[in-house]
Image (cartoon, coloured by chain):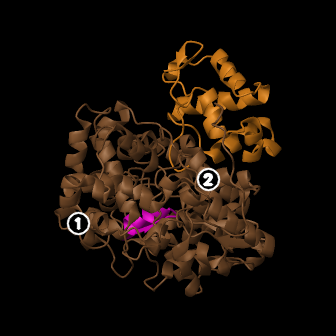
Chain colours: A orange, B brown
Amino acid sequence: MADILGAEVDEEGFLVDLKDWTKEIAEQMAKDDDIELTEEHWDVIDFLREYFEEYQIAPAVRVLTKAIAKRMGKDKGNSKYLYSLFPYGPGKQGCRFAGLPKPTGCI
Amino acid sequence: MAAKEFDIPELPTYIEIPELKEGVMDGEGPFKSSEEFQEPLGFPGEKIDNWQEVAIAKMGELKSKYRSVQVFLDSCVKCGACTDKCHYFLGSSDPKNMPVARQDLFRSVYRRHFTFAGKYFPKLVGAKELDDDMLDDWYNYFHQCSQCRRCSVFCPYGIDTAEISMAAREVLDAVGLGQKYCNQILGKALTVGNNLGLPEPALKDTLLDLEEEIEEETGVAVKYPLDVKGAEILLITPSADFFAEPHIDGLIGYGKVFHQDGVSWTMSSYASEGANFGMFIGSYDVMRKAALRIRKAALDLEVSRVMVGECGHAWRVAYSFWNTLSGVGAGAADEFGQKLQDQLDHRYPQPQHIIEYTYDLIQKGELEFNKSENDDRTVTFHDSCNVARATNMGGISGGQFILPREVIKAVCNNYVDMERSTIKESTFCCGGGGGLLTDDLMEIRVKGAMPRMQALKEVEKTDGVDTLAAICAICKSQFSKVLPKFDFDPYMIVSVHQLVSDAIVMDKPQTDDSDAADDAEEETTE
């Protein structure tokens, strides 16, 4: 199996053990995707991690956009904005950077 | 992670049979399922040592258990009618994606081991051994079939290709070669209750959030009840409806319709999934386990009606298989199946599709719409394969084509159909069905979307279509991903109930919040 900064990741690049997550790992994952993490990215990543800690799952898109609207302003509370931060999708790419498991299903 | 590079197919004015490109879709197939996901489903954790022996024995078992499989394997005459009917063949040009050729990967092995001619004169009848290369081809190419059954419509013998693909995947699971996407999801569905693994507290809070949002937006307290014992209707909907866009706007639409009807309804946190991937992997046992969760929820919540949301294969499983799997409908002979039969109200179709329900209310004049709310759109409808070719709605011939269109036309002024040979029973798959909706299969998903995208492009040119409506969670997610590859707006895909939601007139007081809240309260407890 592959690893990122010594932490094991699965074939889709998600952390195998969520406890391995560090900010450096998130930064490295982003760098591998040609993204430089800005404050806005971190706002999303922090929220994803907080939500996961409480519910053991990533937030639904609508929950995420609402939370972002509250934190960053109404004009940013939509999935278009989130896709501009995470082009492969806030759910999948955002969760990967945040060290969360990949959301599965018909999504 | 950077995805594999591949060419996006061009959209021709007419679909033509492509020049063959042998081996273009060769490969290792989707990610394989690990022990962690295999064993809870009763499959070996990895490829077993005596895989050949077990595979042949499993084929023998399937042949005897499902008469249809044997008939389909025996009756193909290689007429070629199916060759150019598959979206994956048309989009990829790989000859092994001609339905007849893909099936023949399985059929040639069947011939070798289960027919007289194949046992003694294999070369004369195209019988082949199941060796490593053949097994690899099975894994790769049977995950390039979405079990959409378009080819079956054109087969003069009525061979159901999907059943062959299901059988092949069942054999693959039996030797330890499962697909990660399907089997990981099934594990969650059978333990947590939905494909996402959305636990009850998260589901509850997501629904509360949604209620807040709708009340803020409309001033009407539309409710999304969960685990309400004694409600009339149990809604079984794909969990993507809770989680993803554009799906959630469809869920908002269902809630508004229930609200206007004044019916009591609920969802179940135990059975919070309409999708049943047991069908995709061809496993009757796994499919039954998933279906039994729904029966248990219906019994526990003492509902009198079971309704299915916008999910293509959920409606197929519900319409065609629930009766014998779990006794929703009529058929299960065991004690709990019988108990459920007694509990359900047979004045209504059991199960009923949400489209049938909304359509009925429209027919009775019980819903009011402001169609001009959708005047900024020109809409076309994508028939989802499992609904189109395996089910019915409304109990009338072709109802599964008529009802969704009638619902759309009741809420939109501008509706256009795509070209006749690409809709209704001849509909092209979105490209992501049958357990293929995973990033590791993106190449075949994009290529397989080409025929649908071609028909869409034509109505965009001729009629200015800018909205694509569907009633399947997989179709909606697949289109969101592939539309931009063909120069469409990814946000043009919507739920049919999103169109309903945008046009429905909510006649509860718009200003007095307390009244609206009281009304809704009564509704959920009555």
Q: Is residue B222 visible?
A: no
Give the alpha-carbon distance from disc 2 to disc 1, as whole Å: 34 Å
B431 magenta-colored? no
Across and down, in percent, residue B220 comes to: 66, 64
Please state which amino acid type lies under the numbered disc 1. Answer: Arg
Q: Is B311 contained in the magenta span?
A: yes
Residue B259 lies, with reference to residue B409, above or below; the image says above
**Residue B139's spot in the image, x, y percent?**
41, 44
Query: Which of B381 and B308 lies nearest the eye of the viewer?
Result: B381
Q: Where does residue B168 sit, x and y in percent of width and height? A: 34, 51
Q: Amino acid at mark 2?
A: Lys
- Residue at left 64%, top 52%? B245
Q: Which residues are magenta?
A: B304-319
- To which chain does the residue with label 2 belong? B
Question: Are dots 2 and 1 on a single chain?
Answer: yes
Please report, as a chain letter, where disc 1 is located. Answer: B
Q: Is residue A71 above or below residue B297?
A: above
Location of the C terminus of chain B (image quadrant): bottom left
Q: Which numbered circle lies on residue B67?
A: 1
**Percent x, y of residue B400:** 50, 77
Q: Is residue B274 left or right of residue B428?
A: left
For mark 2, what is the residue? B447
Q: Toward which corner of the image does residue B5 lie, by quadrant?
A: top right
Label disc, if present, on residue B292 of the rendered structure = none
User: Label 1's element?
Assistant: helix
Residue visible at 17% across and 63% down?
Answer: B335
Give the answer, above or below, for where B389 lies relative to B101.
below
